[in-house]
Amino acid sequence: MSFYRYLSTTVKSSSGNFQPPILSGVVKQLSKFSSQNELIEYSQRPIEYIYPNNMIEACSPQNSTPIDLIKTASDLRDQLLVRLAHCLYSFQSIPFLPAANPTLLSLHERYLKSFENLARFSKIETINDEEKFHEFINRFFIQNNDVIGLLSTGCNEAQKYFKSYKVLKDFLDNVLHKRLSMRLLTEHYLELHKQQKTNQINSDWRGAISMKFSPAKVAQQCINDVSSICFETYTVVPHIELENNIHEPVPFFPNIVEYILRELLKNSMRAVVEYNKISFGKMQNVKKYFDDNRDKPLCKVVISSDPVDEVFTIAIRDEGGGINASYDEIFRYMFTGNVTEADEANKEETEEIGILSDFQERMVQS
Ligand SMILES: Nc1ncnc2c1ncn2[C@@H]1O[C@H](COP(=O)(O)OP(=O)(O)OP(=O)(O)O)[C@@H](O)[C@H]1O
Ligand SMILES: [Mg+2]
């Protein structure tokens, strides 16, 4: 089965189109930054694409050369330095006012510090060096769990200070692409390290890539998680039907799919509950409607693959009233449902805002 092409497309697009940066602005602002020469050097280097099929082949048990953790660590150090330098360039390229936003500034400083610390790992040549590097990468991975939330908060707060939407979009596209590829590469290395050190090399995993990834299993797990959070928040849960048309496992990065599915299911469940709350008024009536209609799915997840097995698709359809916005608007950063204005109208609906933000908060925590 050849899903490799799809995997390659995913990672290639996550690296974005490389634009060689012009660094004079960066250099001026970073005169006190001790690794500025390295920063200039790395930010002028193009991003080297890493293809998942190569990642899989490199750690296949059939491969005559076993994984060399020292070399893998050393390569990762280089790849992260280039990507961090490109991210820093993006931060340096935004106008002064958004750049001064405290949330964006703290993220910028965090990336600078990471770059500086990483640049200090001059060479990884021994097992000991690799162990130290592994500890560093582990911290780096955990520390950056909140990047998406911080970017979202910072850009929301500062969006009116960006000169145009294009400036905001270019900034977010660049940082998110680099961040995604750093995340995948880091996670892959951490898994390889764990598998080698604990001798847990098995045919189901190649680093962070699951060779037996089952979209249906992950979808069901996400449905269960989001359903229980929906219940805690609203006391009702719409029934979600899962239609699975892929019966063979595929190689994939499970965490990415899980992240996206949870976000989409969260949107669907929220829409279905909120929409029916408007129609039925009380939550008890919504519950009765959901119970009476268990055979008629208000939300459906369909998993399929194309005839030549090049891609798989996970589609989510719901009866939550749809989105009253154009295609272009929906895919703009910062697009969100305009719940607040409508809800100012009456007190009961103001409580709804509380429920809504509570739902979002629980999702973030989970
Ligand atoms: N399935 C859906 N049905 C109806 N409206 C939807 C659906 N999915 C998204 N929307 C609308 O699109 C808006 C944007 O969704 P998006 O997931 O990007 O952000 P959000 O849900 O508002 O915030 P967050 O995902 O960060 O909690 C939502 O606020 C909602 O109004
Ligand atoms: Mg959402």
Image (cartoon, rainbow, N blue to C red):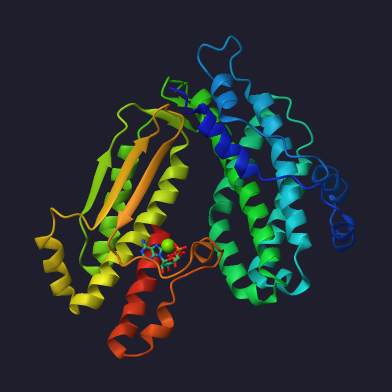
Q: Nearer the viewer, residue 341 or 266?
A: 341
Whether 166 is drawn above or below 262: the answer is: below
Of all residues, the one furthest to the top in this rendering is 64
**Quadrant placement of the N terminus:** top left
Q: Position of residue 352 (x, y in %)?
A: 32, 79
Of all residues, the one furthest to the bottom in this rendering is 346
Whether 107 is drawn above or below 5: the answer is: below
Q: Position of residue 129 (x, y in %)?
A: 69, 31
**Quadrant placement of the C terminus:** bottom left
Q: Quadrant of residue 293?
A: bottom left
Image quadrant, ligand 1:
bottom left
Whether 163 is drawn above or below 28: the answer is: below
Q: Is residue 103 left or right of residue 344?
A: right
Whether 336 is drawn above or below 205: the answer is: below
Q: Position of residue 120 (x, y in %)?
A: 78, 42
Q: Nearer the viewer, residue 152 or 269?
A: 269
**What's the residue at 39%, 29% (across, down)?**
307
Total number of numbered labels? 0
**What's the residue at 22%, 60% (across, down)?**
238
**What's the residue at 32%, 32% (across, down)?**
246
**What's the residue at 23%, 49% (across, down)?**
241
Q: Position of residue 9 (x, y in %)?
A: 57, 36
Q: Is residue 120 left or right of residue 204?
A: right
